[in-house]
């Protein structure tokens, strides 16, 4: 769970209320050249899933099916963002965050299209506070054109050069820096389904909350940008604790971006690659271990496992060792008019090893459109329509068909088809700094299994900013 922080919509120039804007109006804060700032957000999402048809659920003691009965779930988050300008080019940020949640079916049974992007592994209905970000950012300027930067969360107002190098170190979400998209990225204001937060197949290194610790660099040269990062992954798949042995186990990514203008409308193309080295399980190795010795099944491993009760199934627990996982993706956005924008993402991961930090998808695409409401007299409203589809590898299918489970899915067997979701939302600007969103999702083949579903999911989201 993350939120796009940089280039956040500017509350201070959009008629919304913010503490920084109020202080600036009274001459107590320089909103154009900040030495410090403070922002906050609160988001509550309520989800309801209708009952759906399923030929079987948790077959033979497997434990990772989406339950077929009607369910309700929720998430509530609060985040405070504090930024301070230290010395020339240096900025320091911290962002304490709270979450309370109740996922549908204990966050099991959906592959690449989890219905609420805020959901975290290991969360609970009790409020939990944690430091989501603690960042040191240093900018080295090399000239070019100057442009202004708006005040916002994790962003101090000022000016930047079009040619610069930005170094980031500390605790952050890799999605603060990589794979951004104007129309599908800030899901506290946009789509609700996790398939639109980033590429569903982007198994970026992170703890169970979506955050990591490491180093990142960004080199900007006018319309071009090149990014790289070396970050920590979790000690175990979807674990809350990070592995800080970053010379032997790590996540690496690179991204090349080009921004352009077509008929006076801005757009961007990004190519992203990642390479993880982690103590993960290979699907073929897990199957081979079980076939060689059926006692090495899903109920007998004393190591890190997913608590399956299927004694006739292989388990990734028996196959974990130092493995490499790689993927490459494409991210495009294009403004068509001032109020209409299109987006596309697609990623191919190798699919040899288990999901370690994100979703169970091995390949994914998503695309859609966001339309501002000025055409019907509601400038600050937005309607969005998105479609996403995920696939898993043949090795992954074979493992699931033998009754195996991974961090999110496993019905006991599988009638494989790609998982698909249609997400439609309307964001209504209620009052200053407050938005209410109604969201509908149609989910086909949950957990890549045509023997189950389709599923209708309804979400209501209220979002505040200060």
Image (cartoon, grey):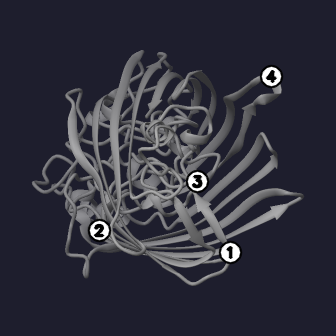
Q: What whole-number distance in Å separates the C-alpha atoms at marks 3 and 4?
A: 34 Å
Which is closer to the viewer, label 3 or label 4?
4
Q: Does 371 sit above or below residue 458?
A: below
Mark 3 packing: few (<14 Cα in 10 Å), some, or many (20+)?
A: many
Q: Are marks 3 and 4 in contact (CB under 8 Å)?
A: no
Residue underneath mark 1 = 145
Mark 2 packing: few (<14 Cα in 10 Å), some, or many (20+)?
A: many
Q: Closest to the observer: 330 or 296?
A: 330
Q: Is residue 42 left or right of residue 272?
A: left
Q: What whole-number distance in Å separates the C-alpha atoms at marks 3 and 1?
A: 37 Å
Q: Earlier in the sequence, mark 2 or mark 1?
A: 1
Q: Please give the label number shown on residue 364.
A: 3
Q: What whole-number distance in Å separates the C-alpha atoms at marks 2 and 3?
A: 24 Å
Q: Closest to the observer: 363 or 259?
A: 259
Residue underneath mark 4 = 376
| Residue 39 percent location from the top left of the image | 40, 42
Q: Earlier in the sequence, mark 3 or mark 4?
A: 3
């Amino acid at each position: 769970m993350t939120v796009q922080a940089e280039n956040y919509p500017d509350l201070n120039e959009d008629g919304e209320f913010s503490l920084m804007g109020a202080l600036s109006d009274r001459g107590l804060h320089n909103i154009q050249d900040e030495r410090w700032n403070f922002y906050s957000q609160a988001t509550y999402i309520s989800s309801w899933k209708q009952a759906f048809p399923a030929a079987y659920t948790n077959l033979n003691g497997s434990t990772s099916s989406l339950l077929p009965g009607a369910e309700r779930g929720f998430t509530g988050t609060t985040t405070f963002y504090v930024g301070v300008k230290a010395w020339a080019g240096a900025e320091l940020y911290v962002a304490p965050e709270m979450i309370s949640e109740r996922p549908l079916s204990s966050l099991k049974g959906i592959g690449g299209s989890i219905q609420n992007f805020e959901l975290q592994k290991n969360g609970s209905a009790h409020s939990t506070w944690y430091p989501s970000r603690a960042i040191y950012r240093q900018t080295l300027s090399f000239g070019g054109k100057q442009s202004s930067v708006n005040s916002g969360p994790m962003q101090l107002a000022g000016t930047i050069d079009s040619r610069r190098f930005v170094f980031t170190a500390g605790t952050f979400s890799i999605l603060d820096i990589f794979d951004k998209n104007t129309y599908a990225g800030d899901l506290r204001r946009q789509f609700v389904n996790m398939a639109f937060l980033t590429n569903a197949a982007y198994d970026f290194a992170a703890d169970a909350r979506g955050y990591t610790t490491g180093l990142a660099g960004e080199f900007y040269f006018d319309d071009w940008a090149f990014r790289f990062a070396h970050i920590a992954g979790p000690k175990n798949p979807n674990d809350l604790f990070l592995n800080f042995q970053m010379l032997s186990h790590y996540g690496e990514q690179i991204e090349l971006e080009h921004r352009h203008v077509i008929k006076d409308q801005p757009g961007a193309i990004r190519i992203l690659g990642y390479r993880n080295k982690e103590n993960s399980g290979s699907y073929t190795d897990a199957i081979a271990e079980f076939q060689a010795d059926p006692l090495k099944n899903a109920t007998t491993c004393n190591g890190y496992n997913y608590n399956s009760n299927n004694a006739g199934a292989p388990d990734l627990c028996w196959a974990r060792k130092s493995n490499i996982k790689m993927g490459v993706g494409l991210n495009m956005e294009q403004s068509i008019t001032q109020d209409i924008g299109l987006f596309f993402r697609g990623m191919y991961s190798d699919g040899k090893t288990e999901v370690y930090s994100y979703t169970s998808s091995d390949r994914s695409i998503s695309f859609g459109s966001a339309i501002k409401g000025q055409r019907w007299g509601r400038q600050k409203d937005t309607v969005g329509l998105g479609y996403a589809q995920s696939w898993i590898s043949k090795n992954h299918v074979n493992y699931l068909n033998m009754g195996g489970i991974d961090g999110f899915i496993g019905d006991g067997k599988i009638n494989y088809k790609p998982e698909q979701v249609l997400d439609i939302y309307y964001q209504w600007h209620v009052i200053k700094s407050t938005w209410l969103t109604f969201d509908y999702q149609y989910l086909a083949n949950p957990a890549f299994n045509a023997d189950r579903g389709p599923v209708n999911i309804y979400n209501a989201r209220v979002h505040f900013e200060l």
